[in-house]
Amino acid sequence: MADISLIRSQAPLTFGQQLKLTAQLSWPAMMAQLSSIMMQYIDAAMVGRLGADNSASVGLVSTSLWLFWGICSAVTTGFSVQVAHSIGASEQARARRILRQAITSCLMFSIVISAVGAAIAFPLPRWLGGTEEVCHEATVYFLTFVLSLPLLTLNYLGGGMLRCAGNMKVPGGLNVMMCVLDVVFNFFLIFPTRPIELSGTIITVPGAGLGVFGAALGTVSAEIITAGAMMWYLCFRQPDMAISRERGSFRPTGDVIRKALKVSAPMTLEHAVICGAQIAVTVIVAPLGVMAIAANAFAVTAESICYMPGYGIGDAATTLVGQSYGAKRLDLARRFGYITVGAGMTIMTLMGIILYICAPWVMELMSPVEGIVTLGAESLRIEAFAEPMFAASIVAYGVMVGVGDTVIPACMNFGSIWLVRLPLAALFAPTMGLQGVWLAMCLELTFRGLIFLWRLISGAWLKKGL
C-alpha cells in the first residue's frame, strides 16, 4: 500500500502508487463531505415537514450563511496550506508553530465576522425580498449560526490541518459522528412532544417544538461537539502536529500571516463575491414566489450530493499537491493534479446521470409539497448536464490551492459567476421562471470547468505558488 510519507522521502512513485494515494486520501475526504451534505439533507427534510413558509425562511438566508461560513473557512486554508508545505519539506516544528498561530488568528477573525453577522441579522431577510411570513424565522435561523461562528471556525481549522497533514480518516469519522448527532438533536429540538406508533404500540416522544430555531440549534450543537473533538485530536494526538508536546508562542508572526494572507485573501474575496452573486440569484428568485424560493433552496441542497465527490477529491488534491510542492517535486505535483481532476470528472459524471434519473425522488425527500417537488426536479435535471465540468473546476481549484496559487483561480471563479451566470439568470428568469435560473447556472458551470482545465494543462499554476 502506498504511503504519503513517500512524497517527502523523495522515493519514486509509480503511476499505480499515485492512484492508490489519491484513492486513500479521497475516500475518507468524500465520506466527510457526504456526512456534511447529509446534515443539509436532514435539516432540509425535517424543516420541510413544517411547511412551505418555514422552508422558505431557511432558503432565504442559506446563501448568506454560506458567505459567512465560507469566509471563515477560507481564512483557515491559508494556514493549512503552509502546514502541507512544511510537512512535505519535513519541517514538523514549523508546522506546529503555524498551527499555534492559526488558532489565535482564526479565532480573532471569526469573532469580528460573527459580530458583523449579528449586526445585520434583523434587516437581512427584508433586504433579500422576504415577506412578513418568513422574515422572523429567517432572522432566528441566521442569528443562531453567526453567533456560533468562532467555534465553527475551529471545526474548519482542525479538519483542514488534519487533512493537509495527510490524515483523512479522523476528520471523516468525526464528520460522520456530527451527522448522527445532528439527526438526534434535530429529532428532539424541531418537533413538539408527539405520539409515534412502533409495532402497534403508541410511544410518546418528547420534543422541544422549536421549529426552525431547533433545526439551527441542533446543527450548531453537533458542529461544536465535533469541533472540540477535532481540535483535541489535532493538538494532542496527531503525529508531527501535536502542540501539547512542546511549548511555544500563540502570537501571530509577520511571515506566517503574510503567507496566509497570500492564500486566504483571494479565496476570501472570491467567496464573498461568489456568495454575493448567489444572494443576487436569491433576489432574482424571490419575486417568483414562496414555492420557487423553497424549491430553489431544496434543489441546491439536493444537488450537493453530486458534487460531494468533487470536493472530497479536491481536498485530497490539495494535500497531495501541497506536500509534493513542499518537497520540491513539481513533476509529481503536476501528475497528481491530472490524476485527481480526471478522477473527479469521472465520478461526478456518474453522479450527474444518477441525479437526472432520481431527481423527483430526491426532491420528495426534501418536501411533501407537490409544487416544490416538481419545480425542484425540473431544475435538478437541467443541472445534471453540468456535473463533469463542475468537477473540473472544483478539483482543479483544489490542485492550485495546494501550491498556494489562489489569485488567478479566484478571479476565474468570481468572473465566471458574475459575468456569465448572473446576466443569464436575470435574462432567463422573467420568461422561464426557476428553470431559467438553473439553465444559467448549468451554462456558467460548464464555462468555468473549461477555463480551469485550460489553466491546469498550461501549468502556469506551478509558477505562482508560495
Image (cartoon, rainbow, N blue to C red):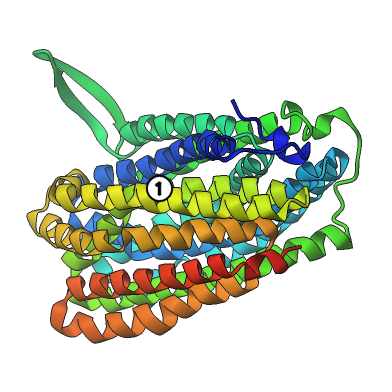
Residue 371 placement (x, y as % from top left) = 9, 59
Residue 301 placement (x, y as % from top left) = 32, 53
Residue at left offset 24%, top offset 72%: 439
**The one of 465 and 207 positioned closer to us in this rendering:** 465
Relative side of 250 to 349, left or right: right
Residue at left offset 47%, top offset 50%: 311
Residue with the mark numbered 1 = 308
Name the amino acid, label 1.
Met
For the question of whether residue 115 can be seen, the reply is yes
Image quadrant for the N terminus? Answer: top right
Relative side of 183 to 7, left or right: left
Image quadrant for the C terminus? Answer: bottom right
**The one of 61 and 440 positioned closer to us in this rendering:** 440
Residue 23 placement (x, y as % from top left) = 50, 36
> Is residue 18 shown above or below 325?
above
**The one of 160 and 20 positioned closer to us in this rendering:** 20
Number of numbered labels in the structure image: 1
For the question of whether residue 406 can be seen, the reply is no
Residue 452 placement (x, y as % from top left) = 49, 68
Q: Secondary structure at mark 1?
A: helix
Relative side of 159 to 375, left or right: right
Residue at left offset 33%, top offset 47%: 305
